[in-house]
Image: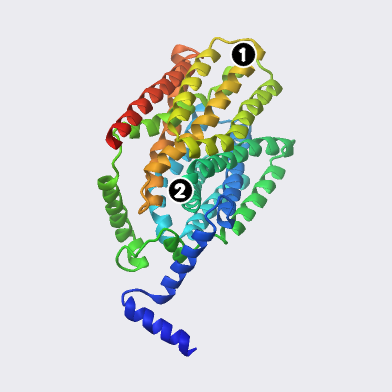
Amino acid sequence: MQVLTSYRSDYRIAYPHTNYPESRDRMKTATMLRHNRHLFSPFVIELLIIMFLVEFVKGALLVAILPVYMGTVLGLSAFSIGWAFALQYIGDNAFRSPIGWVVERIGYRASMIAGLALTLLAVAIIAYTSSVGWIVVACALLGVGTAPLWPCVVTGATQMAGEKKQGTVLSIVNAAWLSGTGAGPVIINFVMKDSFAPAFRVLFVCMTAIIVIALFLPGQRQTEAMHDRQKDGGSADARLAPRGLWRNIVGSYRQIGRTLHVSRWFYPALFLQTFAVGLLSPVITLYARTVLHLSPSQFSMLLVAGGGITLLGLIPAGKLVDKFGSAWFLHIGFALSTAAIVTLTWTRSLPAVYSVVGMIGLSYALILPAWNAWVGSIVPKEERGATWGFFLTINGSGMVLGPIISGKLWDLFGPQAPFWVSAATQAVLFVLHLFITAKERIVVR
């Protein structure tokens, strides 16, 4: 006991402005980082399971349950359904930036549990009400509730993996995301035969499991130690009070703006990367049924083929990105995607369609890990969560605007128009990335 007291006394003399218990947490967490800086630490596994299950719930709701429930049961128009879905995307993207900042201040556990509570409330509202207004509110709550997911998972996973394995860990994150998004509708369609009740029971079980797992995430002290943060000044309560919260968020983002040296073309590229996907997401099913004349089973097999190729290619591509860098993977991916999407607009033979979809799947297996590793290399260590949240907001806004423009293009110019614009967007991304990386090489030299 005397030795311990003496040690604490010596520690306080050497570091008079440092709180001993918090410093002990920092040292313990730093040790954890040194010994567990690998891809499958318990913390990363928890994040991956949460990512899979949350995307499972979202995929089941947005693809399998809500379109049928709102269209056939509630009798809503396609326009009303579209705006309800848009609210979900808007809520998700609008809150990613501030939540990215908050995560590093209050911890992964509190951030994630707060979001999951709103998500659970959204599922409960959809399950127990038939009011159109409440369904729309639930869609907005679903977006806000899932907003902490990507900032938490991406920030935590990249922090644990380290700079040399960002491509690999982010490819694993994307694999968990795609697996959950794809498995949700498939399993729920199998469960949901004559009633929505069994489907909602599955979703409630998933949400309960997610919340239990989230209880094991790092708290405030551990999170601050992981990110090697000192207090921003003042108590946690003062920093997170409404007035202080907004002032600190704005101050942090101004500081990021001063220290973040990126090309001005980087931000349009962030937006266009998801805008190209958003253009296709609402019309791909309609195009397959009305233009390609595919049956539901043929279309399902097509999605499995394209998604399977992407899923199988993500982790090998991520490892190659870590070894050789992201530039050429993005060049090849954008070029291949542009060619494949254009080819899809005039292809009618089923074997040819499968080949083209396979090319698209391969292109995204190259793009996703390389893109995330490239963006991750720009994120500063000091404000990792806030910067990821800011980048993810810009990146995700393409998924808000893309579907709205896509429908207008279809109505005004025909079924091929969204595909042409998506291909043109991929071509612009190819040129932008060439330009940005060329400038980066010049600066390095």
Q: Secondary structure at mark 2?
A: helix
Q: Nearer the viewer, residue 216 or 410?
A: 216
Residue 234 percent across, percent down from the top left: 30, 68
- Residue density around tag 2, few if under 14, some if 14–19, many if 20 or more, within 10 Å: many
Which residue, given by chain and number where applicable, does mark 1 sit on?
Answer: 292
Q: Secondary structure at mark 1?
A: loop
Badge 1 vs badge 2, beta-carbon distance below 8 Å: no
Residue appearing at x 42%, y 46% in the figure: 96
Is residue 128 visible in the rendered structure shown here?
yes
Q: Amino acid at mark 2?
A: Pro
Residue 151 is marked as 2
Residue appearing at x 33%, y 78% in the figure: 14
Which of the marked residues, 1 or 2, is nearer the chain's N terminus?
Answer: 2
132 vs 416: above or below: below
Q: Nearer the viewer, residue 404 or 106?
A: 106
- Nearest-to-viewer mark from 1 and 2: 2
Q: What colour-coding does the image apply?
A: rainbow
Q: Amino acid at mark 1?
A: Leu
Residue appearing at x 38%, y 28% in the figure: 433
Q: Nearer the viewer, residue 81 or 218?
A: 218
